[in-house]
């Protein structure tokens, strides 16, 4: 993860400059040449394949802000739909120095350093309770973070001596999660939310925070949420300590947990 600076409200900001664009703060997509703005898009229109559908596709690309739109491929999908691949040019650039990016504050530590930091801080393993909560039946993401085998060649939290991991699995009611956290004296609660249809995750995540507050446990635990549509900014807004999104590696979470528990001990 790139270097981040605290902004004083529990988030971190980064004005990041693209490493490969030392002279320009303005970036456009790269097609054939740097900053030519060329992008490829794909979409389906509910129009039968033919000249009308192709013109509708070009107009659609113009509405996306693309100049010189071209249809590269138009494939009929059934009788009334056409799938398109198109090319076009973006002319408005992103100004990197104006971006504010929220990210959890931690430095990447290797497994030995995480184990050492937790040992130095607590003198015992951190107790970590994880669950996919509410109606959510997706376990792969949570398992990727917690299980020994981990994710993309990166070992899960079970592989660290720094963590005692309890994985409660999927569709765990918030009440059961809170009861288990209390029973085990959890140092951290790790929640997975993959289904976000109709914002079902928002009510469920808020409910967990309310339950923890009602039980007087909220300040006792590091509260983390992860999932493909989760951002750190959203997590903070909902009352969590950190949020982890797509492609998170167990080492990211391990590094964050070790540093967060250490930071709390020092405060
Ligand atoms: C496998 C799968 C299923 C399996 C799940 C099996 C299982 N045991 O997990 C089954 C078939 C059960 C399933 C069911 C459903 N699914 Co489904 N499913 C998927 C699928 C194909 C892959 C998900 C996955 O495993 N990804 C791989 C993992 C490694 O990635 P990840 O979850 O993002 O996890 C990473 C990060 O997000 C993060 N992370 C995740 N959790 C956590 C937690 C913590 C604490 C941390 C730190 C990090 C973290 O770290 C992980 C590693 O980097 C996705 C589509 C897709 N390609 O993503 C749809 C998808 C997630 N499913 C979807 C839907 C709608 C459903 C159903 C509602 C379908 C239906 N109508 O019945 C049901 C819901 C069931 C329920 N009650 O939850 C939608 C969700 C849309 C949305 N935004 O809400 C998706 C996106 C498909 C789609 N395009 O519509 N599904």
Image: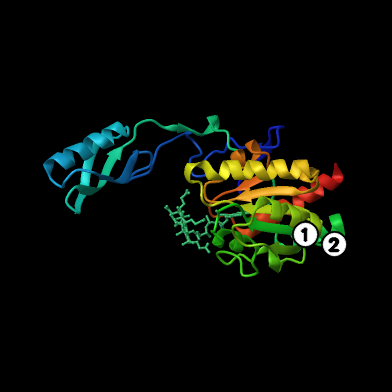
Secondary element type, mark 2: loop
Which residue is nearer to you in this view: 192 or 38?
A: 192
Residue 58 seen in the figure: yes
Residues under numbered marks 1 and 2 in contact, where contact means CB atoms less than 8 Å apart: no
Residue at 29% from the left image edge and 32% from the top image edge: 63
Q: Which one is closest to the eye, mark 1 or mark 2?
A: 1
| CA neighbours of label 1 inside 10 A, class few (<14), some (14 to 19), many (20+) | some
Left or right: where 82 falls relative to 156: left
The location of residue 95, given as percent across then percent down, is 48, 31
- Against 150, residue 222 (above or below) is above
Left or right: where 225 falls relative to 119: left
Residue occupied by mark 2? 124
The location of residue 171, given as percent across then percent down, is 59, 57
> What is the quadrant of residue 235 in the picture?
top right
The location of residue 176, given as percent across then percent down, is 70, 55
Disc sitting over residue 215 in the figure: none
Residue at 34% from the left image edge and 43% from the top image edge: 33
Residue at 24% from the left image edge and 38% from the top image edge: 69
Residue occupied by mark 1? 127
Residue 241 seen in the figure: no
Total number of numbered discs in the rendering: 2
Residue at 52% from the left image edge and 41% from the top image edge: 199
Secondary element type, mark 1: strand
């Amino acid at each position: 993860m790139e270097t981040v600076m605290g902004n004083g409200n529990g988030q971190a900001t980064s004005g990041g400059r693209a490493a490969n664009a030392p002279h320009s703060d303005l970036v456009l997509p790269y097609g054939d040449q740097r900053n030519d703005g060329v992008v490829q898009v794909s979409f389906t229109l509910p129009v039968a394949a033919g000249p009308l559908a192709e013109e509708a596709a070009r107009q659609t690309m113009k509405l996306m802000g693309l100049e010189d739109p071209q249809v590269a491929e138009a494939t009929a999908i059934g009788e009334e739909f056409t799938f398109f691949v198109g090319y076009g040019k973006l002319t408005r650039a992103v100004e990197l120095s104006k971006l504010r990016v929220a990210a959890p504050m931690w430095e990447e530590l290797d497994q030995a350093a995480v184990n050492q930091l937790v040992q130095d801080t607590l003198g015992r393993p951190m107790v970590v309770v994880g669950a996919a909560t509410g109606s959510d039946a997706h376990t792969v993401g949570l398992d990727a973070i917690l299980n020994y085998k981990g994710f993309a060649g990166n070992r899960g939290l079970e592989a660290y001596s720094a963590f005692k991991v309890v994985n409660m699995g999927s569709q765990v009611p918030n009440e059961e999660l809170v009861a288990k956290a209390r029973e085990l004296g959890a140092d951290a609660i790790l929640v997975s939310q993959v289904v976000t249809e109709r914002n079902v995750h928002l009510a469920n995540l808020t409910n967990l925070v309310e339950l923890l507050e009602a039980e007087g446990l909220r300040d006792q635990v590091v509260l983390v949420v992860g999932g493909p549509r989760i951002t750190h900014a959203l997590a903070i807004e909902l009352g969590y300590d950190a949020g982890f999104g797509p492609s998170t590696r167990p080492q990211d979470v391990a590094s964050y947990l070790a540093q967060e528990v250490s930071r709390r001990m020092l405060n």
